[in-house]
Amino acid sequence: MTAIDDEIFLFSPVGIVVNSLEGNFCKANYAYLEMMGYSTDRLAGKNFKDFTHPEVDKKADELFEQFISRTKTNGKISIRTKTATDQWIWISVNARIIRNENGAPAFFIAFVEDISQQKYEEEKQARLLEEINALLEATRIALQADDFIDAAHSLFEHCRILVGAGSGYVALLSKDKNQDEILFSEDGGLECSIPMNAHMSVGGFVADAYKTGRPVYQNEFNLSEHASMLPEGHISLQNILFAPLMEKGESLGMMGFAQKRKGFSVRDAQIAGAFADLVAIVVKRSQLQCEHQKMQIAIIQSDRLSSMGRLAAGICHELNNPLSYVGYSIESLKDDFAEMTKAAIDLEKAENQNTGTGWQAVNRIKEMLIDDDIQKRLSLATEGLCRIREIASALGAFSLSEKEAKRSVSIDSVIEAAINMAMYEIKYRAKLTREFTAVSPVMASPGRLAQGFLNLLMNAVESIEPGKVMDSEIKLKTWQQNGHVFFEISDTGRGISKDRIDNAFEPFYTSKGNTATGLGLPICKQIVSELNGEIRLESIEGRGTTVTMQIPIHEKSITDYVKSQLDTCISNRFVQGRILLVDDEDGIRLALHRILRKHKTEDAASGKDAIELLQKDHNFDMILCDLVMPQTTGIDVHKWILANVPELADDMVFMTGGVFTDDAKQYLATYDPPVISKPFDHRTLAQFVNDRVAERHLTKTN
């Protein structure tokens, strides 16, 4: 190689390594050394197998055998390799055999790229889709099962597989609250001398889970003081996870898991909590069969879940569509960049051999870089991710419990959430038109309000015969008048006869046959009545129906409307702020740093770290803090701030992916801090932060 070739090799931004035919390191450039954290001296005399994961040996051996036998001159594999700090990372290795003048293999050259983040995102997306599908299936089971034991067992098995536990059980809490009475258990093939149907006294970690109403886990249980509480003869447990079956703040029982090979995580606890909630619903439904008054409540909850269950297939379809073209866009872009890498190799080869054909490789790279299709695919992927985020947000709105506190709500966002849930049903029945005007917020429970809007949408859809999309219409309209917000939905469906209109709001009355519960309109009326509003229905048989909801404006809305003039001014100016980012997810903090790069940002990887940082320095304009974190939660951080630096309390904003505990809901209802839902839109989040920081500085100067 010439001096210039050496410079290109050493300073190339892509990791490059040269190996002997036996796989020993001969030479590596700076990019590779920096990626792996090794020095040239440390690599000397080492074989690539010294650093690769055992599971990839066979894959790599096959590739090298193909090189040696001349059946292949180049190949690409993805493998796991160990860095100098003993960290396993994923790398993409694009290897090529270099032959001498006689055509015999001389050495290998490989282009190496760190694809750990890409692998992480792929695994994360696959995991998310798996979890969504599992929860949708669990919802269907919870709705359709006739026997609550069978349903609970099925939900337990789904959850056990999803979290990767080897064994576990489901138990109901005894009437005196002192014992867990096991319904069934899975021993995972373990031999235990304790009868699997034995009652268990409530204590230790089980008591902790009941006390907090939240899942708890311990990955070194065999070393903890609670291990001694196991009865004699019980199998040794390496790790445990308990998720209480909570129903409206009442403890019904416990779902327990144990023996996960690599230990449980916060995500496992969240998943177990979600499934425990479904098991609790199943158990409660069974108990309510003997009590008439409670049975009415159970039926209302069942109707809500029924809507979710019916829409489950449509939601999966709406998720799979954008996932399909997002996946295509990313995979095709990956292929294009692989082609550009190959062109770069051809260019280097042409330069090394001085063939004068390098311009062909340059033109190939140039054509791909200026191809408008790359930008189109990036836009398509972004559009698909936005669609997935909208659906995820809509799902979040419907995951809230009956105890969700009322708060100031923009009905436009709640209506859009209901539309996102029902869009799959709507688009095959009718055209959807909107006529929305700016309206003030109302004081309501977003989940309950969304349920009402969804019921009205589904009633409109079901009134329209399929197959006449272009001739059918569902029209949504909002306006504000005399201190009230109005929502109107009209359809061109079959309508209701005059003799049946008076019965439309009666529970269990339906004209849809045996498949309907007859609770859609009665529930809407109940929701609106709870808000001191009114609901009216007008219909002409054969021509369509119009339903109008009237809800009082939130009292603070008048002040908020006047304040909007100031907000407009604030939105038009930028003030750089100092912002503390608190989240236990590295990816979230990294994204926030990027989104808020115009501001000065610092981060903390836990609530404990945040408190320690604030003890030394609390000069921040805003604190963006995750609500749910292990050990020290966002609420714990907020409580510490209230006690130690109360002037910062109003500058704290919670972030959450949903699934609040009753304690968290009560706390948020008491202090009413701003809450940002994940996944967030980066432009909306950036504007929100800009406005809050500008408003804070404007208040200071005044």
Image (cartoon, grey):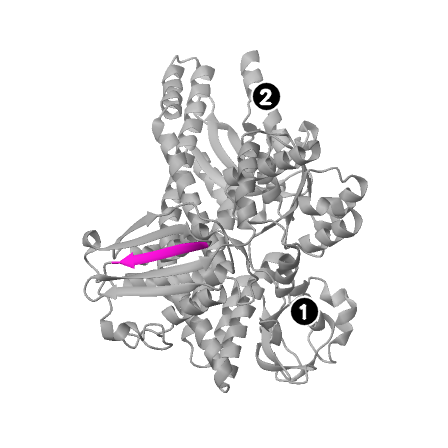
Instruction: Residue under label 1, please give it.
Output: 209
Where residue 469 sits: x, y (%)? 21, 54
69 versus 528 height, above or below: above
Mark 2 secondary-structure assignment: helix
* Structural crowding at the residue carrying mark 1, measured as other residues with C-alpha within 10 Å and reported as few (<14), some (14–19) or many (≥20): many
Residue 277 vertical position relative to residue 268 in the rendered view, above or below: below
Query: In this rendering, does residue 37 appear at all?
Result: no
Q: Which residue is mark 2?
A: 10
Total marks drawn? 2
Amino acid bearing label 2: Leu
Q: Nearer the viewer, residue 61 or 323?
A: 323
Q: Quick one: which residue is furthest to the front in this view?
A: 482
What residue lies at 28% left-to-right and 64% top-to-bottom?
538
Q: What stretch of residues is rendered in magenta?
A: 484-491
Residue 621 position within the rendered picture, expressed as x and y whole percent measured from the top left: 68, 38
Which amino acid type is shown beneath numbered disc 1? Ala
Q: Is residue 490 magenta?
A: yes
Which of the image's four quarters has the C terminus? top right
